Image (cartoon, rainbow, N blue to C red):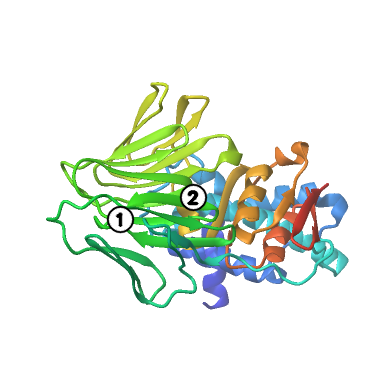
């Protein structure tokens, strides 16, 4: 892009007239080339002025009232993330002003050997009690259970292949457990596909025969349920049952966050609790279950499945929840004082980065500091 076109593009960006591709290009350029930004160098003392100046230059406000567009897994939709990208840009840009003023970074304290991100790994427990470490198993047939073949594919996924639907087989239940620092994907015998996040597990029948299709989830899972008119699919979590026929949705039911968050991307689902509370969801809605009461929000729907594409996306998220997610993904112990845990952050970064790169993004805001000792992270002010 020549200088004249670049200048015109910056003007369009400030006026909020850029299309999706132009927004993605200019924000990517700004993040990668902060030294080219035509802004004065700020000192630590004038940080608030720096933040205000950068914020004023971003057309974020034009997007605040827009409903986020729904994306299916694997699709890239830049404009659905404009606000969080801009907010991260604010933090990173201010950080670079500090860098240019002091000529040195403020890295995470006690930086040691890199703590690497999670990998694809899981433990499968069969109906007879045998266990298989899926990350170590060879591709191909792992087991044959009644009317089902259990396979590991070349791309390290678990697939159940029904081979005898006519037989009245006794139901065998399997469990796949994802450790801290892991994730995995599997396809059930009915064709339903499930993504499981770190420190999660799913218990399910090796073959769906008659009646309801019922699975039990702990932690977090994203489901693309195969449609069957006469065979509802139910996901049972602590305190909630989600009932569908065929749809795409995410359930976040980690015990340490104090609520169950269900996000619907496609189709319709019905939620209910043992105490009698119930809630219907339409695409684009997110249900929060706290103390047997449902509340509905409509923002950040796409962010709910960021983890399936190996992204951390936080929008006004409490530091406590952010650090819990980091602890699960990097398999580290986190110590975060309650007062600091209430601070909120917004931003986006790849989960493929090592933990120092992730923490340094928040460190640049100058709101918190991090001390790493082995696999223990302490949050300080």
Mark 2 and mark 1 residues within 8 Å of each other at the beta carbon: no
Please name the residue shown 19% across and 64% down the image. 163
Tell me the residue at 38%/77% (across/down).
139
Q: Residue furthest front?
A: 128
- Evaluate whether residue 364 shows in this view: no
Q: CA distance from mark 2 to mark 1?
A: 31 Å
Would residue 186 be seen by someone viewing this image from the given angle?
Answer: yes
Q: Which residue is mark 2?
A: 303
Is 256 located above or below residue 351 in the figure?
Answer: above
Q: Secondary structure at mark 2?
A: helix
User: Vertically, is 284 above or below 7?
Assistant: above
Q: Give residue 270's position: percent from left, percent from top.
A: 32, 33
Task: Give the mark, 2 or 1, whose residue is nearer the N terminus.
Answer: 1
Above or below for 283 versus 81: above
- Other-residue count near label 1 (Cα within 10 Å), few / some / many at <14 / 14–19 / ≥20: many
Question: Which residue is at the front of the view, 276 or 362?
Answer: 276
Residue 206 marker? 1
Out of 29 and 358, give the one closest to the viewer: 358
């Amino acid at each position: 892009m020549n200088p004249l076109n670049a200048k015109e593009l910056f003007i369009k960006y400030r006026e909020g007239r850029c299309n999706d591709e132009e927004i993605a290009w200019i924000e990517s350029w700004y993040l990668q080339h902060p030294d080219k930004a035509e802004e004065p160098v700020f000192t630590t003392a004038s940080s608030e002025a720096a933040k205000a100046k950068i914020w004023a230059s971003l057309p974020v406000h034009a997007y605040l009232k827009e409903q986020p567009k729904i994306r299916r897994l694997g699709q890239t939709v830049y404009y659905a993330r404009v606000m969080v990208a801009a907010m991260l840009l604010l933090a990173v840009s201010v950080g670079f002003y500090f860098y240019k003023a002091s000529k040195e970074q403020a890295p995470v304290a006690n930086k040691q050997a890199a703590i690497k991100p999670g990998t694809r790994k899981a433990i499968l427990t069969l109906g007879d009690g045998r266990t298989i470490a899926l990350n170590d198993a060879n591709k191909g047939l792992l087991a044959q259970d009644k009317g089902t073949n259990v396979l590991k594919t070349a791309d390290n996924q678990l697939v159940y292949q029904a081979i005898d639907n006519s037989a009245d087989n006794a139901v065998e239940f399997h469990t796949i457990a994802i450790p801290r620092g892991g994730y995995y994907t599997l396809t059930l015998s009915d064709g339903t596909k499930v993504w499981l996040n770190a420190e999660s597990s799913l218990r399910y029948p090796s073959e769906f025969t008659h009646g309801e299709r019922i699975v039990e989830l702990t932690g977090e899972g994203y489901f693309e349920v195969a449609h069957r008119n006469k065979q509802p699919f139910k996901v049972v979590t602590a305190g909630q049952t989600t009932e569908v026929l065929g749809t795409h949705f995410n359930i976040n039911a980690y015990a340490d966050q104090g609520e169950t968050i269900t996000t619907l991307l496609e189709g319709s689902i019905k939620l209910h609790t043992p105490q009698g509370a119930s809630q219907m969801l339409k695409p684009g809605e997110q249900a929060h279950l706290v103390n047997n009461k449902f509340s509905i929000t409509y923002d950040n729907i796409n962010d709910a499945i960021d983890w399936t594409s190996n992204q951390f996306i936080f929008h006004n998220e409490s530091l406590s929840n952010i650090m819990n997610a980091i602890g699960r993904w990097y398999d580290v112990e986190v110590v975060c004082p309650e007062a600091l845990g209430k601070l909120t952050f917004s931003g986006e970064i790849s989960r493929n980065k090592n933990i120092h790169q992730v923490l340094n993004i928040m460190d640049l805001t100058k709101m918190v500091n991090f001390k790493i000792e082995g696999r223990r992270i302490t949050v300080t002010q």
